[in-house]
Image (cartoon, helix red, strand yellow):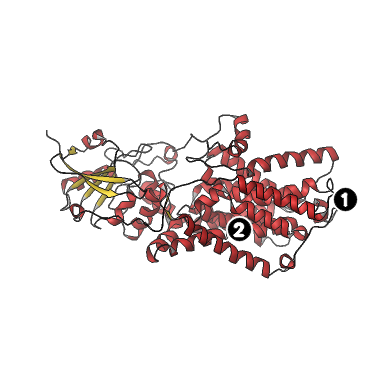
Amino acid sequence: MTDAAEVAGADAAGPAPRTWRTPLVQTSVLAPIAIALGALLAGAIYTWFVGEDVNWDWMNYHEYNVWAVINDRYGIDAMPAGFQTYFNPIVYFPIYYLRHVLPLPYGMMIMGAVHGLNLLLIYFLVRVLLREAAAASAIGAAILIAAVGPMTLSEVGTSFSDILTALPILAGCVLILSARESNQGRYVLAGLLIGAAVGLKLTNAVYAFGAAAAVLAAGRPVRATICLGIGGAAGALLTGGAWSLMLWREFGNPVFPMFNAVFRSPELMAANIMDWQFLPRGLLDALAYPFYWLVGDNRSSEYPFRDARFAVATVLIVLGIGRGLVTRTDIFTRRDTQFLLFFGVSYAAWLGVFAIQRYAVALELLCAPLIVLLIARVLAGSTARLSPLRLNAALLAVAVAIALWSQPGDWFRRPWSSPYQPAISKSLERPANYLLLDKPLAYIAPRLPPQSRFYQIADIALPIMQGGRFDRRIRAALQDPPPGGTWGLHTRDKPIREPLLERYGLRVDASRPCVEIEGAWLGTAMQACPLVARDK
């Protein structure tokens, strides 16, 4: 490991021992090729090992939204996935086609391989940050830490877009940190990539704030900020502009149904949807989040996980600041400062707006080069008596400890020996109306007769407005039902919400049996119950 002074070409902190390097790491072509192939292979093998992805969001809207675009369902159905029906579906097209065009598990393994490429970008980040000091130990430690991230592992080979959009975010970070004052084009390209990630998924906006903070520390901040902004606007329009334009024309809200208290589309209630359950309850609580994750407190996620990386990074940042104050030296280069700003501002924005662990996959990955960088800067000079071998061993020991302590989250998977291929009863072979009485059920729509119609009437967050287009669409369909009649679809073992049916003058037909359809989660099922008009 080396001091910041060595990287910057200054002598503020004195010389540091040279680290052990291998010829492979010094080879500019062979190293990234080898890491890219290894990352692709690791992602594919891990996907094969953990099984078929059947996460809640896939069951709710990842599958349905793409199918709806392909089959022109947005003018037929009424929000089968609830308010998520109108989230931008573009980012889910690759996984949809890989899942349905190629036989299982090969399509999903290809997606897992693509997700693995995040490790290649971690390699480039370490090389950019440490430059000549990027030894084999530093690169290996960073890749190991990144590879075992709890949320990262949980999303490999899945339909979640957080890990997929982490690719342009990390690439944008590499470009910002490697940009020179004479080459402003990298800022434009970085903005294009990060803006594209925002257009694909709006929650990625937190990384746009981080990128903006990073370029403010550039050599020419005004020009860099303008270039980043131009690229960001172009990227967001490229991936999200057409969808937002459609929403604006249809509903008067370019991010429908989000921020409807601002745009006030009459189709849904005037409310801004916010998930408050994961947010910290105060400043001290917010500061403690990395240490909650260290001990397995999953207050920022629906399901358990354990992670030491954020706690380790927090301690190292405090030590770095403390060492700088004690020695009265600046141990960080300008590039280091830009990276710290990118990470710190993105993290603060994420924690203050969402604090939903899945949305922090890019941050989780960025923790890996951050920890390696901080160890290099904090220990440089103060550990001069240690041999390079011991320094490298210490760095790898930290990485191994983080890896062993990590416990990935679980969004539910099925073994490849039992893929999700539900049998559809003969009772449901004819097209019908389906009133969805809870979530997530929209994933079954593509497996039922194509002339069927699907109406979600149970969304609590944004219920259908009485008299609106969706309400009118449902009532018109009930007046002229398809040959299969009308059914209420709900999760088995959940009570049927009768008041929802009463609103449309319906009740369950007790003279006819309900029909079960196997659910995507093992051991679960949904029930389709025949509906008839209520007695007046």
Q: Could you say which is closer to the camera, residue 301 or residue 523? A: 523
Determine the image quadrant of residue 121: bottom right
Q: Amino acid at mark 2?
A: Leu
Q: In the rendered view, tell whether residue 6 sits above or below residue 305.
A: below
Local secondary structure at mark 2? helix
- How far across and how far down the image is residue 23, in percent? 74, 68
Front one among 263 and 500: 500
- Residue 391 in sight: yes
Between the residue at mark 2 and the residue at mark 1, the CA separation in whole angstroms equals: 32 Å
- Residue at the spot of label 2: 119
At 75% from the left edge and 65% from the top edge, which residue is drawn? 22
Residue contact between numbered discs 2 and 1, judged by CB atoms under 8 Å = no
Judged left or right of residue 138, residue 3 is right
The quadrant in which residue 273 appears is top left
User: Residue 258 in the image: x percent, y percent?
Assistant: 43, 43
- In-front residue for pair 46/30: 46
